[in-house]
Amino acid sequence: MDDDITPFSLRIDDGELADLHRRLDATRLPDALPGDDWAFGVPVTELQRAVDGWGAFDWRAFERRLADVPQFTTEFDGQRIHFAHVRSERADAVPLLLIHGWPGSFLEFVGLIDRMTDPVGDEPAFHVVIPSLPGFGFSTPLASLDWPTSRIAAAFAELMSRLGYERFAVQGGDIGAGVAPEIGRVCPERVIGVHVNGALGEFVSELDDATTAVLQPFEHDRMRRVHEFMQNEFAYISLQSTRPALLGAMVADSPVAQLAWMWDKYRAWSHPLEATPEEALGADFVFGNLGLYWFTRSAGSAAAVGYAQQGAWGAEPQDSGVPTAAIQFAHDIGIRAVAERSNTIVRWTDVHDRGGHFAALEEPEMLLDDLRAFIRSL
């Protein structure tokens, strides 16, 4: 590995941990609105349940489990980048870069590492690299506001060079589904293939008549859900894209504000809707991820990088020519005809009855099977 890479160990200060529990114990919840349901946010009864769950979560045990994952930091243009890196013992393993989204972190992929690096039989094996996006988690503090997907892509390509990987594949979801194909555009000669879950970085609320005419019935349903999202759920994008510092100030001082902001999406974006976040995503992720954002005070910087970049919405990029695959789970909204405008789609999988935004946590085997089938085809 490059000399600029430094081993990283996670250990939150005892005082920070005690302060979190003091704040949770002193929680002051509002009076519930009439009905106390999910129509206007997290119901107070559910919020109290989540606060109790976070208070009971054993962070030190979580740290010990995470210590088994080799982690490192490096620096690009003054920005610290944190990442996990686990090599397979298989000689034919494919280097794989995994890119998370919001409100996630590198923790989304931790549960997949063993199955990726040490598969059963002759399934493709991977050398796994999982960076934290700039401004997220331990890739903080944010040194600059200028982090469009193209710059993130260039930094992650350089990370793979520092690790000695000349050729590699990329997988991502949410923000990662925007960064992954951009890496193919930054260095197409190095990227074996791009695999995403969910939409390929595009957020399309309107389609032209020609595209609408060829949609499948389930794609019409996806557009219906996009319109409902624009009507009922767009507020978080408006705030994160225009006032990330305001959000950061609010949640840096209140763990319950941090919890409510993310718990709403944990529930709304996982499948089925009736499942609790712990049931859908696992307690280690929902509370460990909350702790990651809380202890690093990174909600504002994550919002700035993920949502407040100029040119992040609406621009149609050029096709890199890199073979690209996508899997759309039940909650996803990807439209193949739109994705094909700027990507070389060689595999497209629609799953109608399972899975949501957090595919690596909700449907890890199905995601991994689709990724392996794609890599095998290349």
Image (cartoon, rainbow, N blue to C red):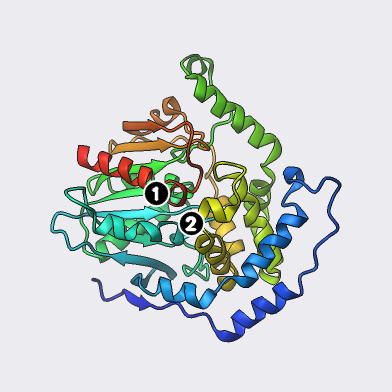
- The crowding category of the residue bearing disc 2, from other C-alpha atoms within 10 Å (few below 14, some 14 to 19, many at least 20), is many
Residue, disc 2:
147
In the image, what residue occupies the spot 70% across and 65% down? 256
Element type at mark 2? loop
Name the amino acid, label 2: Trp
Residue, disc 1:
364
Q: Quadrant of residue 23?
A: bottom right
Which mark is in front, 2 or 1?
Answer: 1
Quarter of the picture holding the C terminus: top left
Mark 2 and mark 1: Cα distance apart in space: 29 Å
Residue 88: percent from the left, percent from the top?
22, 62
- The crowding category of the residue bearing disc 1, from other C-alpha atoms within 10 Å (few below 14, some 14 to 19, many at least 20), is some
Element type at mark 1? helix
Q: Nearer the viewer, residue 359 or 80?
A: 359
- Is 141 left, or right, of 327 in this rendering? right
Q: Is residue 313 above or below residue 300?
A: above
Quarter of the picture holding the N terminus: bottom left
Residue 345: percent from the left, percent from the top?
33, 31
Residue 224: percent from the left, percent from the top?
61, 27
Residue 318: percent from the left, percent from the top?
37, 35
Q: Quadrant of residue 299?
A: bottom right
Q: Nearer the viewer, residue 237 or 288?
A: 288
Q: Is residue 305 above or below residue 253?
A: above
